[in-house]
Amino acid sequence: MREYRRKHRTNTYWLALLASTLTVGIPLAATPVTVRAQQQQQLTVQGTVRDDQGTPLAGVGIAVAGTVAQAVTDAEGRYRITVPAGAHQLVFSSIGYLTQTVEADRQQIDVVLLPSSQDLEEVVVVGYGSQTKKDLTGSVANVASKDFNAGLVGSAEQLINGKASGVQVMSNSGSPTAGSTIRIRGGASLSASNDPLIVLDGVPLENGGISGNGSNFMSLINPNDIESMTILKDASATAIYGSRASNGVVLITTKKGTTGTLRIGFSSVLSMQQQQKVADMLSPQRFEQVIQEQGTAAQQTLLGGQRTDWVGQVFQSAFGTDNNVSLSGSVTNTVPFRASVGFFDQQGTLRTDRTDRVTGALSLSPTFFDAHLTLNLNVKGALNNNRFANTDAIWSAVAFNPTQPVHSGSEAFGGFYESLDNAGVPATGANLNPVGLLEQETHKSRVGRSTGNLDIDYKFHFLPALKAHVTLGYDYAHGEGENRIPASAANAYTVGGSFNEYAQNTQNRLLTAYLNYTAPLENSSLEVTAGYDFQYWSAKSPSVIYFNEAGDVQSTAMASDQRHTLLSVYGRINYQYGGRYLVTATIRRDGTSRFSPENRWGTFPSLALAWRLSEEDFLSGSHTLSDLKLRASYGVTGQQDGIGNYGYLSIYNRGDDFAQYRFGESFYRVLRPSVYVYDLRWETTRAFNYGVDFGLWGNRITGAVEYYTRKTHDLLANVSVPAGTNFDQTATTNVGNIESRGFEFQVNATPISRETLTWEVGFNATQQHTRVTNLSMVEDDKSVGSYVGPWVSGRGIQILTTGYEPNMFYVYKQVYDEQGKPLENVYADLNGDGIINESDLYRYESPAAEWFLGFNTQLTYKRWTVGTTLRANVGNYVFNNTKMDLGAWETLQYVPFALNNLHSDFLNTGFRARQYYSDYYVENASFLRMENITLGYDVGRIAGSARLRLGAIVQNVFVQSKYTGNDPEMPNGFDSTFYPRPRTYSLSVNLQF
Amino acid sequence: MNTIKILCLIGLLGLFGSCLSQLDQLPTVETTSESVYTSVENYKSVLAKLYASYAVGGNEKGDGNADMASPTAAYGYLRSYFNLQEIPTDEVIYTWAGGDNLVDIQYMRWGASDTWVSSMYYRIYYTIAICNEFLRNAGDDKIAGFSEAEQQEIRVFAAEARFLRTLAYSHAMDLFGHVPFVTENDQVSAFFPPRITRAELFDYVETELKAIETILPEPFANEYGRASRAAAWTLLAKNYLNASVYTGTERNADCITYCNKVIGSGFALEADYSKLFNADNDRRTQNEIIFPIQSDAAKTTTWGGMTYLVNGPILGSMNSPDYGVTSGWQSIRTLREFVALFPDATGEVDRRGAFWTDGQTLDVDDPSSSSQGYTIVKYTNLNDDGSYTTDDGLVNTDFPLFRLADVYLMYAEATVRGGAGGDAATALGYVNQLRERAYGNTGGNIGAAALTLDFLLAERGRELFWECVRRTDLIRFGRFTGGDYLWQWKGGTVEGSATDARFDLYPIPATDLAANPNLIQHTGY
């Protein structure tokens, strides 16, 4: 069925082979062969140990290799150790840092230790608690701030793009107001949301945004305030979040205060974004030539004789800045705090597009009663202003007649050239002036958001092994905005202008309370957690009135008040025996207001087993193998996101004044029943995960290999219901099953770790495959499936069919001539019946890639640092709608008064009419992208205690792909004059006091 | 210490208990069905939606907040009905067939995945579903809490809901034949409706209409816009006239009985033909119009329905303000076979044939060219005095679903077909009344010998064109499919060609065949 897969397999095997050779071969090659200085007598060595920020490190262990001599650094990071006679090395080690080995050849040795994310003693945040890496039984990926992507980063999810296997982040467009889509293991749903659950400092956030910032809500959390992001991938790690966990969980932990002296940090990024190409259209000269040769006389009169680069007129080089100040320290040395303020401002490459944001964060973490009571208070706030450019201007600019000028020379329609009809008004159906669409219209919004939480941890005095934890959290936001199009604008000329305001308030309140008990047992340990959660969400907006410029009411939209609640109890047991055998069991019971009382409770258990082989006697002495852990888990998770709050209730909507019906002499506003499905229930996913964690050579190389299988049933999907049984043709109901499986591989290595030279390398690969196993309320379904996805000429271009991957393109097979040119309207007769009709459509590829690869590396030499991140997707396909909809002769003209530019593909195909469903337009969009390249210079100490670092970063450096459109990474696999992602050049300054 | 612990525990449990009740969240902007059916005003508002489901496509201006998700269903019932009843006939050739997905309908070669077939089907069942929902809540047990007078009012509402449901089922019977069957006795969602054959559906419709006949108010006794028993009689007469198509047995005598009931209840022809189709035609419910589907430029707004029928035929050199709108849609023209029904194309002799020929050709070589094919002025947005009000093309003109002229012609046809109780002289009299109105004098009157079936088919074309009856009429005469009567672009060829007999019925949409295993597709599809 897919012969090309063999070719791709070869490519990816080659890539994997290369990566593994690099990560294994280089450390071998780099095994030091050093010349040891000979010491004739014992030597006392002293010095200071600092981290890469310049902070002195206390508690660092220093050992003389091969002897029992040991020392520890004091609170100022100072140490002193006596080295015996002979050639020796000093080994510096500390939890959370890369161990460093230095020749003991002088009396003063100062060392800088680099943070390590590969340390097994490192504590990782998990759901409702934390665990050390070595005790993890689930599939958890942790990305710390030092590994975050650098540059101008508008939103938190961009920090981890390409860093962890199984996690894909795709920006929705090149606009600064567009958000990103995060997928963990591809997502387990169809119609319910595929977004993972985001938990910010223990507070689960509601997906979706607010009026005024619908798609970029995450951007209201300043990425500079984030300490680490933990991604929970398999069911055993996520099941403790129960009904929201099917698509994975991202835990965001923000930076907290520190003990010690006050530290002030200042960082500034200044960047310039360069516009990219949109589509390959004919140049003005070539266009003119084509019309002279092939156009009618009437069409030739529509040539204007100008040379206008419309796309260049609507795009610009965009500037952006991100300035942050942070203070971190302790009040009277007992209350650690951190306060920060950030200013972010970014223009879009599309003119008039911009966003700016002011954020503030305060974190206090005092302890009382001799550390029995710990409080953690975080408050974050953001104020965000957006101006949204009308993105229709991109299509308009691409398709506008390049021989016409931007300005008409007359006052009408704002002075912009428009295609006018006989009556002198903009012709219905003609493209509108793209510059006019941007400059005459105003779409603005202002959003304010505040999130916060108070964590109370209390270790009982009479029983310190018992801990009580309470979290109170909130997330409030207010958004408002306006849209204004004057009557003189061609876009609103016939209705006399258009103006409306909108607003929305959202609230999210959380109460979490749990008890945690760690039982001290001989040679084993038992940890039990049991807790209760209550969460409430509401989103309210008033009704909207649409006016024209004169102030007459044009139409109205109803007010809305949406609320829902979630009530849960959960528990977890962690048992560990002999440091080798680990068992984790969790269970959660959720009750939601979204389903009827009969269906609203669900139970979500999970079980995970792990075996630390490397601790077994036969392996514990190994020098090569420092860590080997086998893991297996099973869990059940739910999904109720993306469906209505009152979907099980029979609800009536009142119509507005414009949809009334008259009885006698009076008009009556109507009451209309809405679609409802009484027995809506949880979509449940059962997942197995098998993993191996390994570490070699003292964790110089660490990695993990995972394999998972997942089955989702009671899938929430919007499907056709039998006619007459409900109040619409389709309804979102529980129907059908999906299966998916995947393979993940991650390896991180530090081939070189020396005083002056460090080199780190990371590689991750993910393979995913999904299949619909049932999608109908009817057994034995011979139907072709249901059309989904972006609309092309009356139906979705993709299809969901039982037995196939979801969202495959449902198209005709194009027939080509001997030279490889496609023949217009000639398609393969796949069922051999002699007629070309709907029965000859076939399922060809899907937008989902089969392989996702990520590669990152960083080299530090003395003061210089250079690094890069690359990403590749293999096997994803895109429907090039820009080419289809602009590359046929009929697209040249829709109304007698305007000509449209043609895609240069018209010169290849010569199509007269649009070939809507030809697989000629479904292109392989596998790509390799260099996400960023960074260069940093550590100036070191200036003016006393300040430390300065400079950086230069380029983001979106290049994309290598066979796809003929401008960017192969398209949401839904559909390219229709996509707002291009810009290339960003940034300079950064970082000052620490 | 212990008491404090116990108090904390109780406090927590209390908190838990109150939180548990928080799991019942009810909407505050919308109303749940429990609170809707508590006042007569609300019953009337729901009834208004049942009527409005024929007229508009949504709950807000211009089909906004659409009733249904699919884009074509969003244009509403009347536009879909017109497209299926008129576009495949000799009365219409449509300009934007390509962009509007109407090519297969136009060329009579549609399949089970056709968007407009689907749109009409699901619109019919939407109306049936909301009528069923109303009736579930209007049963005697549900209204027992109201006063006697209110209960009586609601019983009349319920009879009207049954009428509207029967009207939808009649259309389903006419267009689709063997269809799913759902009543208020079935639950909402999660079941597979059984299949009912065309003949069984005919019996059901007949029984329903006869049952509500006595509950519905007398003719002219109900408010404007609402059904009276005359509407039920007209629908019965229509179904009886087509009974041989629906059941195989003719019922012409019953047709005549009900025609007589309508004619005897006080309806009279409107003297000026054009006033039946203008912005003030709501007044014609006092004489000729038996049951309208409303339209109002300010309050009952849609981009389908009457907006479509007034703006659609305005093209070429026509001046839109002359018809009460702002700009024409250049969509609808006629074919030469239809023009040939009239004595000439000027409208001087027969005022119904007021074709617009300036800049238009008679023959249509290219269906997508709006300058080929004559258009005709029928529906306007002008008031009786020539003034007009519009909002970007929205109109005030109602659609005359049932009118007296149709009943006259049905009487005549049933009589000529040999129905008992019909009088040939009376039939001739009725036909000549229509001819006199059309000619303005007796010059168009015919003699008894000329009153043949062929003449009646042609007269129905002249009198009732663009009133969504042409396809039904042609099928009854056996001329819709097959080669007996050809018109341009029938079957997709410029001179017209014979089409397969299966096209006498529209197919069950593929999506419903997949969703309901009880349904069987019609032969040939």
Image: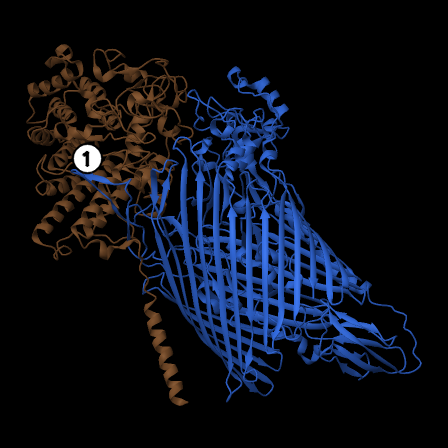
Query: Viewer-proximal residue, A608 or A426?
Result: A426
Query: Viewer-proximal residue, A175 or B261?
Result: A175
Specify the quadrant of the image occupied by residue A16.
bottom right
Instruction: Say left or right for A314 vs B244.
Output: right
Residue under the image location 57 percent in, 72 percent down: A137
Chain A shade in the render: blue
The percent position of residue B67, horizontal first and vertical second, equals 32, 44
Specify the quadrant of the image occupied by residue A234.
bottom right
Residue under the image location 40 percent in, 50 percent down: A718
Instruction: Say left or right for A34 vs A694.
Output: right
The reply to whether residue B451 is in sight is no
List the residue tagged with mark 1. B247
Amino acid type at circle 1 is: Thr
The percent position of residue A164, horizontal first and vertical second, equals 62, 60
The percent position of residue B206, horizontal first and vertical second, equals 14, 39
Q: Quadrant of the N terminus of chain B?
A: bottom left
Instruction: Say left or right for A938 vs A979.
Output: right
Residue under the image location 61 percent in, 74 percent down: A330
Q: Label 1: how many residues lie within 10 Å, few (<14), some (14-19) or many (20+)?
A: some
Check the image and report above or below for A775 versus A309. Answer: below
